[in-house]
Amino acid sequence: MSLSGCVIKTIHLRLRIYISILIVVVFVGTLGMMTFEHRSLLDSFYFVMVTIATVGFGDIYPVTPAGKLLTIGIILVGVGCFVGLAASIIDMMIEKRERALRLGNLNMMVGAFYSEAGTSLLRTFSAHDPAVDQVRAALLVSDTWSDDDFTRAFDALHQHSTRIDSRTLDLPDLKGFLTVHRTFLLTFFENPQIIEHEGFTPLLQAVFHLLEELAARDQLTDLPAPDYAHLSGDINRVYGLLIAEWMTYMRHLKKHYPYLFSLAMRTNPFDAHASAIVR
């Protein structure tokens, strides 16, 4: 789980604790006021609420020793929890806003990745995917797509099994491509916030693992069948993550950056007739 996710989870836990304590305080306080001060249900509830909220109108106040002790308990426990609850809500709002800003910056990095390397990898892998025609139609994103269309595309991707055979690829060429972009890819890991992007980080890890596998072999031809099968697994892992993250990124562009979405749509790696030229 990312650091931001842990922070939000901690805030949610605090909220649940504060709310639970407040419910107990309100229930016990209301019942106590009815019992010790002989107030009605509405007056007792009203007194507890204005006390917890630190309003204290003074129109209702305890007169019995037990009622006064109960009020002290309400102030010590209830007011503290009320303030803690308010502070936790504010913390959660600030954290969500900051996380949205961080993810916006990270999505710019995702865009740079696809512009520099990701789209080329998708185009190469999809050309050697024997089942790509079964899912191609679902990946032809257009400017008329709604959230429902993206949901249907993700459903189609979940049902699609990538079955690229590494023997059909030019492995030396793939190794050369990844090696050329190695320094560029490493710059992503220099950003400590990269872990915030829970989909992009596994993709980068899978790409680097594939590069390490290819670089660890002195030659990439005439390999044993089990080794080709192993490389096929690594390639299909990268391919599957590439498609999923590309679709997520396209949805992000469609929603927030229409001009960037226009170019990405016209250069769709799954469109056999893709062209940056506007026609």
Image (cartoon, rainbow, N blue to C red):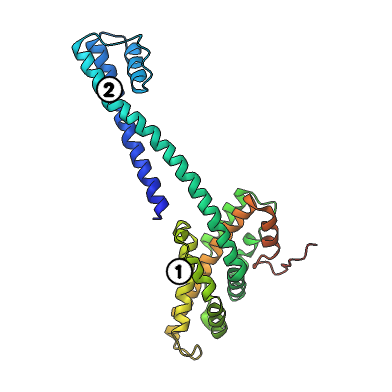
- Per the model, the C-alpha gap separating discs 1 and 2 is 53 Å
Whether 21 is drawn above or below 59: the answer is: below
- Residue 90, given in percent of the width and then of the height, sits at 43, 37
In the figure, is residue 182 to the left or right of 59?
A: right
- Write down the residue under mark 2: 74
Disc 1 residue type (three-letter): Gln
Q: Nearer the viewer, mark 1 or mark 2?
A: 2
Is any part of residue 161 visible from this angle? no
> Looking at the image, is 29 positioned above or below residue 159?
above
Of callouts 1 and 2, the N-terminal one: 2
Residue 205 circle label? 1
Residue at image point 70% right, 70% down: 272
- From the image, which quarter does the C terminus lie in? bottom right
Rate crowding at label 2 as few (under 14), some (14 to 19) or many (20 or more) other CA atoms within 10 Å.
Answer: many
Coordinates of residue 11 in the picture (x, y in percent): 37, 42
Residue at coordinates 29% horizontally, 30% vertically from top-left?
21
